Image: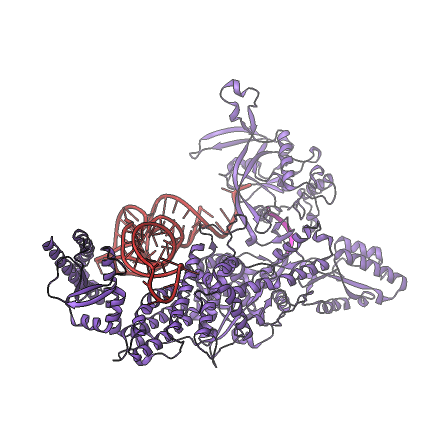
Amino acid sequence: MEKTFNAAEAEPRIYAAWEKAGAFRAGANAAPGAETFCIMIPPPNVTGSLHMGHAFNNTLQDILVRWHRMRGHDTLWQPGTDHAGIATQMVVERELARTNRRRTDFTREDFVDLVWQQKHKSRSNIREQLERLGASCDWSREAFTMAGAPGDVDGTPGGQNFHDAVIRVFVDLYEKGLIYRGKRLVNWDPHFETAISDLEVENVETPGHMWHFKYPLAGGESYTYVERDEDGNVILEEERDWIAIATTRPETMLGDGAVAVHPGDARYAPIVGKLCEIPVGPKAHRRLIPIITDEYPDPDFGSGAVKITGAHDFNDYAVAERGGIPKYRLMDTRGAMRDDGAPYAEAAMKAQEIVAGLTLSDNEIDAINLVPDDLRGLDRFEARKRVVRQITDEGLAVMVPNPDASGDQENTAGRPEWVPLVEAKTIMQPFGDRSKVVIEPMLTDQWFVDAASIVGPAIEAVRKGKDNGGTDILPEADRKVYFHWLENIEPWCISRQLWWGHQVPVWYGFDLSGEGFADDEADGALDEVELLELLSDQALLKGDERHHCAPDFGAVKAQFDDVLGTLPTPLNHARVVEVADREAALHAIAASLAEYNVSQDPTQLIYPVWRDADVLDTWFSSGLWPIGTLGWPDETEELKKYFPTSVLITGFDIIFFWVARMMMMQYAVMGERPFDTVYVHALVRDEKGKKMSKSLGNVLDPLDLVEEFGADAVRFTLTAMAAMGRDLKLSTSRIAGYRNFTTKLWNAVRFAEMNGVTGTDAIPTQYIRDTDVGQTANKWIVGETAKVREAVDEALEHFRFNDAANALYAFVWGKVCDWYVEFAKPLLASEDTEIVRETRATMGWVLDQCMILLHPIMPFITEELWQTTAKRGNMLVHAAWPSYQAADFVDEKADHEMTWVISLIEEVRSARAQMHVPAGLHIPMLQLELDAAGRAAWDRNEALIKRLARVESLSEIRDMPKGAITIAVDGGTFCLPLAEIIDVAAEKARLEKTLAKLEKELGGLRGRLSNEKFLASAPEDVVDETRDAAAAKDDEAAKLKAALARLAEVA
RNA sequence: GGGUGAUUAGCUCAGUGGUAGAGCGCUUCGUUCACAUCGAAGAUGUCGGGGGUUCAAAUCCCUCAUCACCCACCA
């Protein structure tokens, strides 16, 4: 064997061998009738690459999967990737930008093709990285959240058609009324030009300003404004012909529909119900809006009056809904001020008619563009500046004394005495989590899941827990977070105005059966003009009852055919044809009508329908990951076998995005929990605790680390640091330490090999547990092995990964390498061939167990060692996981004896080091007193002790010679006669120090034992333990005192 | 504003009622035939402050301080 393990060379080779053997296939190594164990990988983005969080997340999954597989369970680790709507589209758009092209330079179809190509190019990237890490996924089942969607060239090895499953769920939920369409205020990302969900918005404290403006009362009216303090004393009273409004977003004033004050606010009671003027826009067409009351305004904040802009603020939206206030949209999809529709003058007049009582539909109101002509097309932030300037120039800003103009006259000369009130203020500003641009609340038509209606079982499941057929979430703290979010759940906006994703399976058509769609001239036939009038007027349908949802066009066609069948001739002959969009439909229907008017052939008439252009939120599809990957809606064997799955391992950052949605959706579709346990882990951070990010430059690439230290070391590090519920701060020195651990294991095995030890699964039972034969060291290490096996299982059972790793680390390094291998050296060199044979057998077994128990955490080096240390019938990946009990293997006597031997050796070493006895010097030792157990222990382990303590000989004496070092152990006293080198003062100091420490401990123990309440209340075994400890320390203290007394004689 | 978690050795962190541990770092020593990616021996803690419960508290409760994260609509 080489001196170290060559990870870079061996790991890929070993992985290939596993794959070749089909070692990771679902059910590989399963015992007949075994229980199942299934983990769904959290699908990484298809164009992504492996970061530290993935490495951590997948290491934990791999540990559980390998552990269960070795235990003979029917195991599936389902891999796959996510199409990641925005993220992936972004990658492709960025690529296009390099050659100065935009998405809109392509047709939708062509662009989506480009994305598919990108997906195809990068699909193997993440997989190769996971393989490098050692992830034992069943790659033959690799899934993709858009598999089977139009344009998919790759398909999936597992054959799942994820797309069909997603569409099917949409249709089902739609039919149950759980998915609906509506014009709502949503978070709009002006960069990607799409709606996003609440969760995709990051609220960040940003420095901003609050402006205060005067809204003049209509017709020059005035009122007495009275302000009182808490006691009701008048502190301000003045005549005003305006009302003050504060805003952080002046540009939205253009869309105000009202000013609201609290119903109990006495200051404004005189003017409630009156009109006031929005102080911006062309003078000739200033809009008047009503002053209304609503509970929302807080009288103590600002002026107590709030402007209501229903289309651009979530609070205002609610007020507007309650008060029937029109909601005027001011911006386009890119966040610029609208530049469409009629000129401002016309729009403002229309708005004024609404104030006067005109009722319009939502769509009609949406068509009104209230942006003044000079601001149209401007970016929203530029428009803000201009609005502020215009109002201020007009003298309608609230003014305050200029703080810079007070005080001494010389320096402030020329400065205005009054300035506009503009408060600097940090405001919570919403940003898109991907685009990083300011999110705009925008009134648009979107699709929503009625989450509140399906959330019940998801809450209930976690409340009742795994043992009652529900789901456990670990750690506990995350359960609260989960509940809090679900109990306050909002409708989930699932439509996105993107091109990459699952297109909403809904088709629209003109309403031919609706009211008002009639032949004006009652001549029994529609002509082109009549039809177009109707269509362009109001018979267009985008309303709820006028679209059709179906899995595909064929099904939709049948639905529309039914509707057409009820219409009068010739419309009932029209053919349903799919066209690109509403625009195309208008042209198509006009053209076909023209054709008909010429030919009078009813089969020439077409009825155009067009599909909803939106795609579904990525999380809608990944929310179906557990069933979609198992072949649902088909009742596949895998679905029956592995669903509900066993464990989900994921980071806390996607509890809402993903975990909660999966819970809701699996219950909605299957009526069943998706997993028994959710294990939520921490985020990986850099060694200073900072989130790793490219901009900070503190990103550790897991693959670089794997290159440098080997996958096993990286995995072991992550595992050892996986304590629940905290950040995981990673440093390379820690990884290096665990790399050293692999080397340590490697060399222990190397030592064994050099001494004729071979791997064996034969438990050396004949030597252990209360047998008369057998070396104590061998008996002892077998017992220790059983203890660590129990500890590892116990830890993994409870997802205490770090406990498992630390137990193994302490065992392999601290027990096997530090002690057992050293003990074995004299034994293997023994002239007694039986001892040699016994020790080889024991060591062979113990090292095998180390490999087995370490394999889930460090699969590569252990597999390599497994195959080099014996001819095996199977690979380690399929080796049988042990189940022996400590109770069966631990020999109490041997355990005691080895503990005694170890402490004797440690005492001698310590004394020698402190007395500066040359390390290599073998010295004689004297035995002053020793009880029977000690004598037996010495006799049985003489060779070991002598070797490890560097003792030359042992002789019994009555009196201690002058100038010797005392070694006090349980049941005996030894000494090292070192007259020539001993420093009496140093030895005295050493003994006194030890004694002082002992006395201190003893004091505590005695104190407890003399406390009657302790004796009465504490459990018996605790009292016994305390007594034993006190007695032992008493004894040791006595010996040390004796030694000090002897020293005193010498001196 | 609400919520959650954290505060333990120089650093990074384990430790859920029995009197405090690991890794790294540090000091001293070591060319012993598995390993210098090593070995041996050491030093370092009012377990954030205060109060309470208990025979016993790093651990449970209250409170204060500081930090971190999550959620939230104050114009």
**Chain rendered purple:** A
Residue A667: x and y, percent? 53, 67
Q: Examine the image and state in which quarter residue A897 appears.
A: bottom left
Q: Is residue A555 on the magenta stretch? A: no
A218 above or below A175? above
Q: Examine the image and state in which quarter residue A197 appears.
A: bottom right
Horizontal arrangement in the rendering, residue B30 relative to residue A164 (left or right): left
Horizontal arrangement in the rendering, residue A593 relative to residue A663 (left or right): right
Number of labels in the image equals: 0
Read off the magenta span. Answer: A437-446
Residue A286: x and y, percent? 68, 36
Residue A400: x and y, percent? 54, 28
Residue A586: x and y, percent? 79, 57
Q: Residue at x 67, y 59 (%)?
A: A115
**Chain rendered red:** B
A765 above or below A492? below
A306 above or below A195? above
Horizontal arrangement in the rendering, residue B50 relative to residue A623 (left or right): left
Residue A600 visible? The answer is: yes
